[in-house]
Amino acid sequence: MTTSGFDVRPNAHPTDAAIRDEILGNSGFGRYFSDHMAHIRWTADKGWHGHEVRPYGPLTLDPATAVLHYAQEIFEGIKAYRHADGSVWTFRPEKNAARFRASARRLALPELGDHDFIGSLEALVAQDDAWVPTPASAAEETSLYLRPFMIASEKFLGVRPSKEVDYYVIASPAAAYFKGGVKPVSIWLSSNYKRAAPGGTGYAKCGGNYAASLAAQKEAEAHGCAQVAFLDAVENKWVEELGGMNLFFVYRDGRIVTPKLTGTILEGVTRDSIMQLARDEGLTPEERHISIDEWRDGAASGEIQEVFACGTAAVVTPIGELVSDDERIRLVDGGGEIGKRLRTQLLDLQYGRREDTHGWLTRLA
Ligand code: COI
């Protein structure tokens, strides 16, 4: 059996339908996985080959596999949304595919074309369609989170790009990323750690960036915060991003500002979409440097009305306060009307409740 060039090996022991439905009703984020995974292998001599969808399950890796030692790995995050008519769609997959290639170039991994990237999502969702939740109402943001990733799988301890690479896509039913749902979160401002430096891997979606954020994330949790915010590594002054999300600042006069991409910030697909939706709303999105002093002063004067985080997993999440060793910067309006509106517009578009005027949706099943 094949789906868009992928050989399909169905899982002989899929999850019982009643158990699956129970999971879909209370999935949380990233805790459960569907019955299959997509896989493509790459070797220096053959290129990409062996396209397959096979039962989800553990990988067998030699202890000397390169990725386990030097972290030559990249990933993506993208969701599949069930529309009211039962069809399943994804959002701007060509943007994720392009970013995956940019990450691959930075991590000296082979580049995967749009056809294989989007084909792997289609092939997996065709097999695991039943794992795409049906939202009970417009207030519910359940989806199937797809996690494409690529690892250096050569058994070799020399430090050089791997000559063998494996690409997989796994799928996990997802509800709101933060435990409390869409409520304003507290953010910890890291002063001990930096996430990225010029010339480093900040713009790439590689596991190493997230590993580097974890000590700061632990500090955040110890201070009762849900995420950590990083400043730039050179001047310790410019706001960059959170551990796994981009940032937006909403000004009283309708400007909405997000830190400019300078190679140290992830080029978020949600970030780009929010800028377009803001433009559609008559707001003025700006990409520029924003300093921690501007955040502090703007919050104190009321010039900055809202701050929100955005990402595939987080969608749009309001930020209630920024906490550091010596201060707490509270936002005038932690609830965030503009963020809420942009969030609703984005979700309405993704779930097919609003016309897709930008041609952002691709049908998967
Ligand atoms: C995503 O939003 O898809 C990410 O990869 C970020 C991570 C915090 C889950």
Image: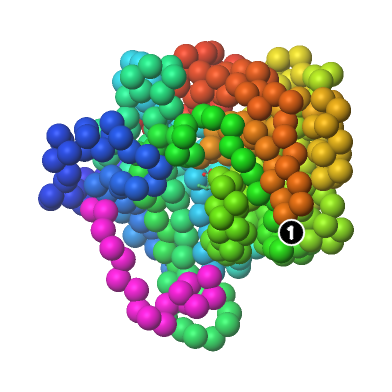
Residue 319 left/right relative to 1: right
Q: Is residue 242 above or below residue 258?
A: below
Q: Quadrant of the C terminus?
A: top left
Identify the residue at image location x=66%, y=27%. Answer: 334
Place of residue 20 in the rendered image (x, y in percent of width and height, measured from the top left): 21, 38
Place of residue 285 in the rendered image (x, y in percent of width and height, measured from the top left): 78, 27
Q: Nearer the viewer, residue 222 or 304?
A: 222
Q: In the rendered view, how is the structure colored?
A: rainbow
Q: Work out whether residue 100 can be spotted.
A: no
Q: Quadrant of residue 252?
A: top right
Q: Secondary structure at mark 1?
A: loop
Q: Quadrant of residue 279?
A: top right
Residue 138 left/right relative to 306: left
Q: Three-letter amino acid code at disc 1?
A: Ser
For residue 304: magenta?
A: no
Q: Nearer the viewer, residue 176 or 130?
A: 176
For residue 66: magenta?
A: yes
Place of residue 158 in the rendered image (x, y in percent of width and height, measured from the top left): 54, 86
* Outermost residue toward the bottom in this view: 158
Badge 1 residue CB within 8 Å of ligand 1: no
Identify the residue at image location x=15%, y=35%. Answer: 17
Q: Is residue 72 above or below residue 120?
A: below
Residue 231 left/right relative to 224: right
Q: Which residue is mark 1?
A: 191
Q: Which residues are magenta?
A: 53-71
Q: Work out whether residue 254 can be spotted.
A: yes
Q: Quadrant of the N terminus?
A: top left
Identify the residue at image location x=33%, y=19%. Answer: 136
Identify the residue at image location x=64%, y=35%. Answer: 319
Q: Is residue 84 above or below residue 123?
A: above
